Image (cartoon, grey):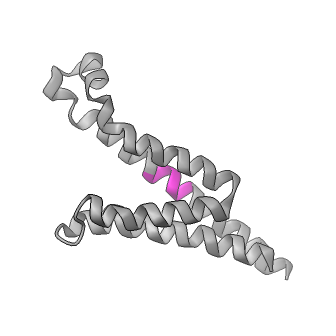
Amino acid sequence: MASSKKTAKILGYIAKIILLIVALFWFGFALLSGAEDYGGGLKGIIMNSPNALPWLLLLVFVYVAWRWELVGGIIVAILGILTIFAFDAFEQLGVLLTITIPLIILGGLLIISWRCKKQ
């Protein structure tokens, strides 16, 4: 029993860390990728900042997952499913592989980790 709880704890931490890395990557990418259209520099980043708001929301969900694995896992998995429709992921294989599937898997790992800890 103790071994499975330790494994579940490690699984949860790995999922949370990877989720944090993914959220920070996409937040940074969204924040910086369109900044040159506004002249670049700090002004361009500030003008482009609304594009990063959805990824800031993902960072909030990462915080929720860190505090409450089950709730965070469910939210992240649902968010992954919603990205299928938001990004038309079935038409764009890259989006499906880089955003949708990782979010669903990480949300699922958080749920599994929570479940294993409760047994």
User: In this orientation, does residue 13 appear?
Assistant: no
**What's drawn in magenta, residue-wise?**
17-22
- Residue at x 39%, y 68% (from the top left corner): 81
Verify whether residue 11 appears in magenta: no
Most foreground residue, 93 or 88: 88
Verify whether residue 18 appears in magenta: yes
Majority secondary structure of the magenta segment?
helix
| Residue 45 percent location from the top left of the image | 29, 25
Instruction: Give the left or right position of residue 62, taking residue 3 as reference.
Output: left
User: In this orientation, does residue 85 appear?
Assistant: yes
Picture quarter with the N terminus: bottom right
Which residue of the protein is positioned furthest toward the top in this rendering? 43
Q: Vertically, is 1 above or below 78?
A: below
Q: Quadrant of residue 65?
A: bottom right
Tally the numbered discs: 0
Picture quarter with the C terminus: bottom right
Instruction: Give the left or right position of residue 87, taking residue 61 as reference.
Output: left
| Residue 40 percent location from the top left of the image | 20, 22
Q: Quadrant of residue 27?
A: top left
- Residue at x 60%, y 47% (from the top left corner): 63
| Residue 103 percent location from the top left of the image | 44, 64
Instruction: Give the left or right position of residue 73, taking residue 36 as reference.
Output: right
- Residue at x 23%, y 22% (from the top left corner): 44
Q: Vertically, is 11 above or below 1?
A: above
Instruction: Give the left or right position of residue 47, taking residue 26 as reference.
Output: left
| Residue 90 percent location from the top left of the image | 22, 72
